[in-house]
Amino acid sequence: MGTKRTAGCRPEAVRVALTSGLTRKQIAADFSIGFSTLRKWMQQDRKAPEKPSVQSDL
């Protein structure tokens, strides 16, 4: 029933959710994923060991 996502879909969806100002429902629709899937990914990202979630050009 589910659709296989590319490896870059998950981190990109989480990054957009954290930085874009768009609603989570809109982001989920844009990435063709369920709202609960996006929420789960964001929760898992917060629990992950420290890593840069947004790259900057320093």
Image: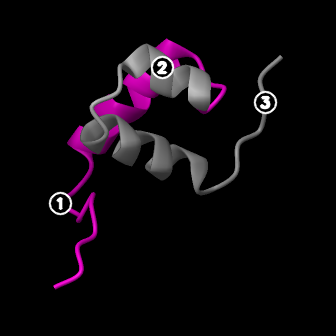
Which residue in the protein does label 1 denote?
Answer: 50
Secondary structure state at the residue bearing disc 1: loop
Magenta segment: does it hold 29? Answer: no
**Which residue is rendered at x = 34% and y = 33% of the image?**
42
Compare marks 2 and 1 and give the one earlier in the sequence.
2
Is 50 rendered above or below residue 10? below
**Residue 21 as seen in the image, left or right of residue 8:** left
Q: Are marks 2 and 1 in contact (CB under 8 Å)?
A: no
| Residue at image location 38% in from the left, 42% down from the top | 16
The residue tagged 3 is 3
Q: Left or right: where does residue 29 sit relative to residue 39?
A: right
Q: Earlier in the sequence, mark 3 or mark 1?
A: 3
Mark 3 crowd level (few <14, some 14–19, many ≥20, 10 Å Cα): few
Residues in magenta, as a range: 31-58
Which element is circle 2 on? Answer: helix
- The residue nearer to you, when weighing 21 against 4, is 21
